[in-house]
Image: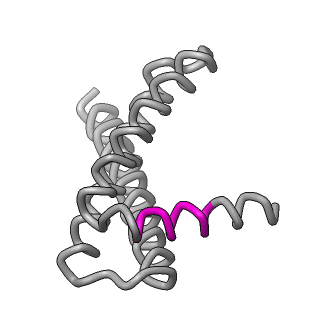
Amino acid sequence: MKKLLVIVVLMFATVTATAQKRFEEAAKATVAEMAGVIKLSPEQSDKIYELQLKSNKKISEIREQYKGDKEKIKEEVLLVNKEGYAATKEIIGASDLKTWSEYKKEQRNKK
């Protein structure tokens, strides 16, 4: 029984570590992409990274919590995105946010 418990704990720790790494890589990628479009100070880069990391975790939790309820997931993710938009505006300013938003819109239209 102890061995089974240890195995379950190790599996959970591995899954959690993998998810954390995935969130970190996604946040780093966003910061790198953003830095290629607008000029970010090191402080802004750090703040955007933390914001993206937090948002990615929240969205993952929402998807897990409302598994199967696509409408609720969409509604909750939209709220997280709105919060992120407002926080990003505070970090980089309205002008750079407009530039970033236009870039992202172009990227979506290319798909």
Which residue is at a point 48% across and 63% down the rendered structure image? 98
- Extreme-right residue of the structure: 111
Majority secondary structure of the magenta segment? helix
| Figure check: 42 above or below 59 | below
Please name the residue shown 60% across and 64% down the image: 102
- Give whichever of 107, 58 is nearer the camera: 107
Question: As rendered, which of 81 and 14 lies closer to the eye?
Answer: 81
Instruction: Give x and y (percent) for residue 108.
Output: 72, 58
Left or right side of 33 for 109 = right
Tell me: 106 left or right of 65: right
Q: Position of residue 33 (x, y in %)?
A: 50, 76
Q: Look at the image and tell me in which quarter the C terminus lies.
A: bottom right
Tell which residue pokes out farthest to the front in this image: 95
**Start-end of magenta stretch:** 96-104
Q: Is residue 80 above or below residue 74?
A: below
Q: Residue at x 39, y 48 (%)?
A: 85
